[in-house]
Amino acid sequence: MAKILIIDDDGGIRKMLRKVLEHAGYDVAEACNGEEGMSAYRENPMISLVIMDIVMPEKEGITVLTEFKRDFPKVKTIVISGGGHIKSETYLDIAKKFGADATLAKPVKYKALLKVVEELI
């Protein structure tokens, strides 16, 4: 089954996403910030999907998304966010403009997550 990397600074969110994805049969890795996430992917390029938060320490989600799309254009990405906006655009709208394959608002709905994951993998 496909390997998925979750990048989120909230341990509770990572744990919840991991449980849902593992229960669905996916192999899951975790990182607590963008720097760790980039390193984790470089160590295991067999990861086929990255789920990342927008607001994180070390390296925020839009920067991480941009680097993934530049350095690893074949990897699929889902960006998640609990809200926020810049001027009139939400963080999720901005993520789509920067190449996110899908976006989901927090709190993430399990069925919606699994549907998007299945579509992308």
Image (tube, rainbow, N blue to C red):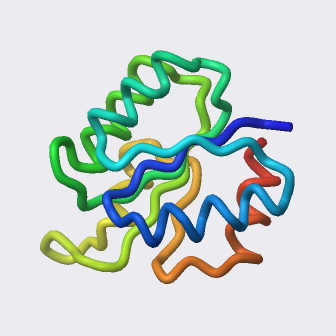
* Horizontal arrangement in the rendering, residue 115 relative to residue 98 (left or right): right
The residue drawn where x is 57% and y is 48% is 101
On the image, the x and y values in percent for residue 48 come to 67, 32
The residue drawn where x is 65% and y is 45% is 28
State how many labels appear. Answer: 0
On the image, the x and y values in percent for residue 60 come to 22, 49
Along the line of sight, which residue is nearer the eye, 46 or 112? 46
Image quadrant containing the N terminus: top right
Q: With respect to residue 2, does 12 lie above or below?
A: below
* Horizontal arrangement in the rendering, residue 42 relative to residue 10 (left or right): right
Along the line of sight, which residue is nearer the eye, 105 or 34? 34
On the image, the x and y values in percent for residue 46 come to 67, 21
Q: Quadrant of residue 36?
A: top left
Q: With respect to residue 7, does 75 lie above or below?
A: above
* Horizontal arrangement in the rendering, residue 34 relative to residue 52 (left or right): left
On the image, the x and y values in percent for residue 78 come to 54, 53
The residue drawn where x is 39% and y is 36% is 37
The residue drawn where x is 70% and y is 76% is 110
